[in-house]
Image: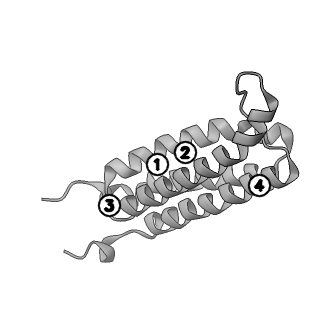
């Protein structure tokens, strides 16, 4: 059965929005590292260690997070409901983590929250739901 022929546009758009979140996350992290506004982890109260470890941890975290989002988005695109559920959970975490961006006025992170919300909503619209139902 050709699953692509049945895929609703809402699922395809959601997939591409998840890809956009990867790009926006990269822009956010890189911008924060360049302008020095990245919040460094508290490593035993040693600011030098935190300054040395923080950027590497941010880049590794970005790479892992981006890889997982792309992987889950690909499975969601193929109609896997479990991937849609995982992405919804990631969306909830991203929205909660992104709330401070609104008071800080961080436009990239505000846009990231908006895109994550759109991607999550599109996966669960009534036109999307039948695509994720189990097939014999």
| Residue position marked by numbered label 3 in the rendering | 79
Q: CA distance from mark 1 to mark 2?
A: 6 Å
Classify mark 1: helix, strand or loop: helix
Find residue 43 and report its image quarter.
top right
Whether the residues at callouts 2 and 4 have beta carbons within 8 Å, the answer is: no
Q: Is residue 126 visible?
A: yes
Q: Residue at x 60, y 42 (%)?
A: 94
Q: Residue at x 66, y 37 (%)?
A: 97
For the C terminus, the image quarter is bottom left
Q: Residue at x 67, y 48 (%)?
A: 56
Q: Which mark is residue 87?
A: 1
Q: Residue at x 64, y 44 (%)?
A: 57
| Residue position marked by numbered label 2 in the rendering | 91
x, y percent for residue 105: 85, 45
Between residue 67 and residue 18, name the one nearer to us.
Answer: 67
x, y percent for residue 95: 63, 41
Callout count: 4
Q: Earlier in the sequence, mark 2 or mark 3?
A: 3
Q: Earlier in the sequence, mark 1 or mark 3?
A: 3
Q: CA distance from mark 4 to mark 3?
A: 30 Å
Q: CA distance from mark 1 to mark 3?
A: 13 Å
Classify mark 3: helix, strand or loop: loop
Query: How would you rate the neighbour count of disc 2 (Cα within 10 Å): few for under 14, some for 14-19, many for 20 or more?
Result: many
Find residue 23 and report its image quarter.
bottom right
Q: Earlier in the sequence, mark 2 or mark 4?
A: 2
């Amino acid at each position: 059965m050709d699953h692509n022929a049945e895929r609703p546009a809402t699922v395809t758009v959601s997939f591409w929005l998840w890809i956009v979140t990867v790009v926006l996350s990269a822009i956010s992290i890189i911008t924060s590292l360049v302008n020095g506004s990245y919040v460094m982890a508290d490593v035993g109260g040693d600011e030098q260690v935190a300054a040395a470890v923080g950027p590497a941890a941010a880049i590794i975290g970005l790479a892992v997070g981006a890889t997982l989002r792309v992987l889950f988005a690909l499975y969601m695109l193929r109609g896997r409901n479990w991937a849609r559920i995982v992405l919804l959970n990631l969306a909830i975490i991203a929205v909660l983590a992104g709330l401070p961006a609104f008071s800080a006025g961080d436009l990239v992170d505000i846009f990231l929250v908006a895109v994550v919300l759109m991607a999550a909503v599109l996966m669960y619209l009534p036109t999307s739901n039948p695509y994720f139902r189990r097939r014999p």
